[in-house]
Image (spheres, rainbow, N blue to C red):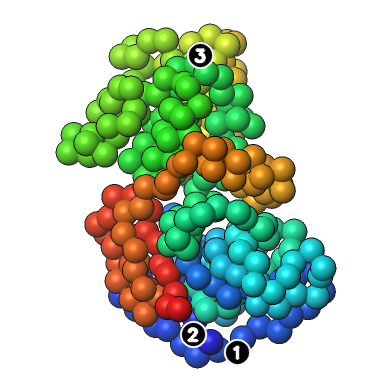
Amino acid sequence: MKAVVLTKPTKAEEIQIKDVEIPKIKKDWVLIRVKAFGLNHSEKILREFEIENDYIKKPIIPGIECVGIIEDSLDDDFRVGEKVISFMGGLGRSFNGSYAEYCLAPKSHTFKINIDLPFEELGSMPETYYTAWGSLFDCLDLKKEDTLLIRGATCALGYAAIQIAKTYGSKVIATTHKEEKTKLLIDADKIVVDDGILFGKLQGVNKVLDLIGAKLLVDTLKLVDKKGIVCNTGILGGVYALNNFDPIKDIPNGVYLTGFYSNSPAKKDISDIVEFINSNNLKPKIGKVFEFDDIKDALICQDKKLVDGKIVVRMKG
């Protein structure tokens, strides 16, 4: 099969497709014929520097999510030809991932889906929609009467969160740090150009989905109303940890801080997301679709931020 294989930090321009063996089926795993997958920020981190860590299995086929059909299974829970998604749980880090024509995935992180969308649209959804859903409902306990601020909204996760929250009935304020990107956030109720300081400039915000991360988190905590919740899910700011963070002083009294980690998706959550998508006829916002043979171009676009929205790679056939 064709696959992308990494052994060291690799620039997008250096990516090559290689021929490798198709994985062999084993107990509690399923073999998926990959039809499409989305590109994710965490895969960029892996490719740029994380691959040097000892906990990354090398050589490694990257890719934390895919959509496809069951090619082989030893388990009666999955039948050949069924449409499935698989993501996280070590995919693309602890074991080979989805940048390939076939993917051997643990059945614990593989889910049958019944959504009538083309594979390239489905390919944009697993990690992005699950993370948005978990952040909004598990962590922020989003209610229809809430005013939700999405900080760093011009990314695939931000677009999905806007779509879900607005469909649910909440008021949404979305931010971008570039004036020219405001047109991408027209589905939000209010758009704010973020200069890094929002404290004192916004009122009435009781829930925040922070996709910038540690870089602006202290400012985010200050702007939310008392009894409000901040969920730190993203790291778009490029700062991965808070230095000299003093929880007693930096988290205002009566404000709650949480974070969402998407590594352990549950079948119930996936069922709820599928039901929500189907009942509201939702379609994901895709930036651009590339063929697998052109994955180098897709990764260059990701690195240079040339595409607004989720980049999806699809397989032929």
Residue holding disc 3: 145
Q: CA distance from mark 1 to mark 2?
A: 9 Å
Tell me which residue sits at (33%, 76%) in the image: 294
How many neighbours does mark 1 have within 10 angstroms: few (below 14), some (14-19), or many (20 or more)? few
User: Disc 2 marks which residue?
Assistant: 2
Q: Residue at x 41, y 33 (%)?
A: 162
280 and 203: which one is in front? 280
- Residue 121 seen: yes
N-term mark: 1 or 2: 2
Find the distance from the CA under tag 2 to the CA under tag 3.
49 Å
Q: Which residue is mark 1?
A: 21
Secondary structure under the numbered disc 2 in the rendered image = strand
Query: In the image, residue 46 lies at what x, y percent?
Result: 49, 63
Quadrant in which residue 20 is drawn: bottom right
- Circle 1 or circle 3, nearest the eye: 3
Q: In whole angstroms, how far apart are the C-alphas of marks 1 and 3? A: 53 Å
Q: Which of the two labelled residues, at mark 2 and mark 3, occupies the earlier sequence position?
A: 2
Residue 90: percent from the left, percent from the top? 65, 62
- Identify the amino acid type marked 3: Glu
**Above or below 308: residue 164:** above
Q: Which amino acid lies under the numbered mark 2 shown in the image of this protein?
A: Lys
Which secondary structure, mark 1?
loop
Counting other residues with Cα less than 10 Å from the Cα at mark 2, is it few (<14), some (14-19), or many (20 or more)? some
